[in-house]
Image: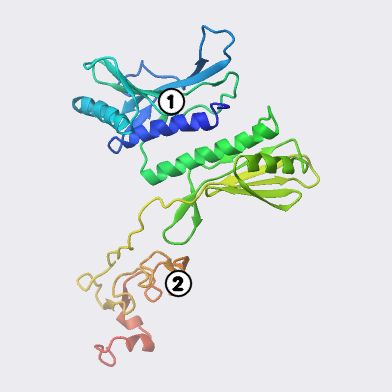
Amino acid sequence: MSEPTGAVRTRLRGYLTDTLAELPAGSALVLRHPDLPNAGFHRGVTLPWNDSDPEDDRAFFDIAYWLLGPAPESADQWYDGIVRGWAERGWPLRSDRDTRPRGTTATTPDGYRLTVRQSVRGHLGVAGSTPPFPAGAAAGEPWPDRIDRTPEPRRELDRAAAELRAELLGLTARLFPGASPELSMLAEPAVLEYREPLRHHFTATLQVAEGGADDVPRAAAVLADAGWLVTAADDRTLTATRGGFRLRVRAYAGAAGLGISGETPGYVLSAQAAPARPEPVVTAATLRAGALLCYECAGLGHCPECLGRGWILDAERRRTRCVECRGARTCPVCAGAGQLVIRELSDPQRQQYPELDPGR
């Protein structure tokens, strides 16, 4: 394992996030607990793997969080739920005692250690440590002050985003050891394609100030060795795909440097329910004097075709602008009022109301 900023770091955070998934909604891991203002944790530390052997140049990363969410009367159940979740995965467990203060450590098949501890007063903390990696590896970005429990699809997408980040930085480290590229990735995913059900993905870009066209074949070799399917558009650009991920390497024309970008697979983050019909803005009982319900929307006010969304689905379930309101979302006849004043009706509009007497 090469560095805590890559697969090691991503995997540890994934295990902590998976642990949260076993708990009720609203739970989170925090460095500072609101009930324990003087007992905050730091953002992790890198320590020697074997400080008794000066020739062992390996290190490991360790971090701890408070668990936010459980009330004092339910803290024991939360503790037991975490331990049970680890046991169901088949991870070996080691517990120091059965009463408070107590702790249990689980070891994953790939060498990560996760520990849950409970204080005398019931407060819970969760810690994690990595397997060894070469000492001196880049420390990477600071860990977050808070990790929230997220629904499964979003958790998978966040994990894919972390993997994408690690792949881009790892490729750069292989091509240009010691380089410090600037990686840009938005905090929230974007819509991959406006086709129902909507899929979201993350994209990331980084700029490397050194290198050029001669490094594009080197990047192709590195990616191919890692199992990526590489295609070259020309001698300055390549695209690589693997498992739904896509990377692109481009050498700048007339200037030094490389641009490396990537995107994750697309994920459906929520079930797409049928659009609910909005409440009408006016009914027969609330009509103003001298007005009638709009003959087009019957008081709805919103566009009756798209129900106020501004778009409809075409034959391939792609979102397209509503043909009736042209994206305005309101009824094109009454402009959202839901009613029409009788004395202002045009002759064609009056024909929509057979109940009207001539001259009324």
Quadrant housing the C terminus: bottom left
Q: Position of residue 277 (x, y in %)?
A: 30, 65
Question: Crowdedness of circle 2 by 10 Å Cα count: few (<14), some, many (20+)?
Answer: few
Q: Which residue is mark 2?
A: 315
Q: How many numbered discs? A: 2
Quadrant of the rendered image containing residue 281: bottom left
Question: Circle 1 is placed at which residue position?
Answer: 112
Residue 16 coordinates in the image, percent (x, y)? 39, 30
| Mark sitting earlier along the chain (1/2) | 1
Q: Is residue 234 left or right of residue 239?
A: right
Q: Residue at point 40% right, 28% down?
A: 108
Element marked by disc 1: loop
Is 236 drawn above or below residue 116 in the view shown? below
Separation of disc 1 and disc 2 at Cα? 49 Å
Residue at 59% of width from left, 40% of height from top?
184
Up the image or down, 18 lies above or below 237; here it is: above
- Please identify the quarter of the rendering in which residue 138 is found: top right
In x, y percent, where is residue 15?
Answer: 40, 32
| Residue 247 x, y percent position in the rendering | 61, 46
